[in-house]
Amino acid sequence: MVAAGADGWLEAWSEDEFGARASEVFSWQFELCAPYRALCERRGVTPESVPEWREIPAVPATAFKYFDFVSVPSERTAADPDAIFETSGTTQGTGRRGRHVVPCARLYRASFHHPFRLALLPDVQRLPVVSLIPSATEAPRSSLSWMVGMAVEDFGAGVEWLVDGDGTWRADAFDVLRAAGAPVLLLGTALSFVHLLERVAEGEIQLPAGSRIMETGGFKGARRSVARHELYAAIAAHTGVPEHRIVNEYGMTELLSQMYEPVLIDGPEAQGWHVAPPWLRVRVLDPTSLDERPEGEEGIIAFMDLANLGSVSHILTEDVGVMDGGRLRLLGRVPGSEPRGCSRAMDDLMAAAEPSPRADGT
């Protein structure tokens, strides 16, 4: 099911292969997820009527703040998922966080494993991991913390957790970095790297040759941000890891799949371009009409993530990007209000299905 292509990346599924699997996933979610089925029926779309996967109704990512999209068969219960991942809640306060109920965490591990290995460890089997992201024990509802935990289990030769669930740094954190005697895999959000740079002098940490860094973005809700080129130049100057060995990862709480920049395989020219695994399709849409835009034109990003079998797979974001040669360049967030196309989709969903109270009362 997963094979490497001639360029070292996962071999793409054909349009027919992806369409057939997407159709099966849509049928599953239409049958088992009541709020999603209500949206589809309001639009007059059923598994029998939809002509192709692009016409499967998409759910705005903001809808995860109001609905639990759970697609489980009758012999299981939505009340006992393997995991619940929550967004940061920075835009509307902690009382209304988006959350992704994950009935089967094995799908998360399966979607994570091969893309992570190819993006971060194409040349080695294991590396010591140093994490500026809290562990899943410290942050059990963080999908990113879960992902780092899987990286440690699958690819780590030991781990040092330098930040706890409250964002507090270990007292010896910088001594750990200074003392690295072998190549390491350093993982962190953009904001955690800003905090690191504020605490150490340029050149103070020189990680051994062969080290690499995964940076995940993450300035949402922060008091400040740093332009990417400035951040990467500063990380390189402060750690000794060259910019072409810093890999950006793009993911969302609402998705179980991730995208990576293939810089460790394709070289520096791949910086800024993200590749998707074969079970994740990415489109760039007109923010008003939601019509697909040609390659090279900007628009809002939509994902069809077949790893989201237990929730809903077709998701609209408020991120802006452009596609070129099958790869995605991220351009930031939509400025100002919610895109009109997303707003209409949200209106349809709210009209079709009444949000039910969650177990936590939100």
Image (cartoon, rainbow, N blue to C red):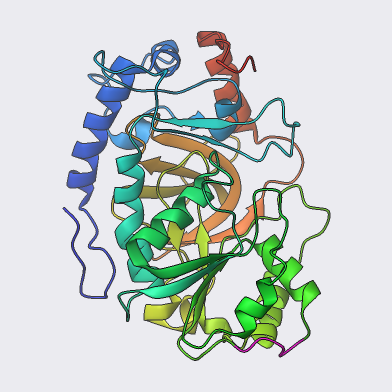
Residue at the image point whose x is 51% and y is 10% from the top:
353
Residue at the image point whose x is 29% and y is 49% from the top:
110
Residue at the image point whose x is 45% and y is 53% from the top:
147
Q: Is the magenta stretch mostly helix, strand or loop?
A: loop
Is residue 89 highlighted in magenta?
Answer: no
Looking at the picture, how far across and down is residue 150, in whole percent? 39, 55
Picture quarter with the C terminus? top right
Q: Which residue lies furthest to the front in this view?
A: 171
Q: What stretch is highlighted in magenta?
A: 202-206
Residue closest to the eye, 166 or 304: 166
Image check: 9 left or right of 242?
left
Looking at the picture, how far across and down is residue 332, in whole percent? 65, 55
Residue at the image point whose x is 31% and y is 42% from the top:
107
Instruction: Decide if residue 306 is in sight here.
Output: no
Image check: 303 left or right of 173?
left
Looking at the picture, how far across and down is residue 198, in whole percent? 80, 73
Instruction: Decide if residue 95 is in sight here.
Output: yes
Residue 79 occupies which quadrant of the picture? top left
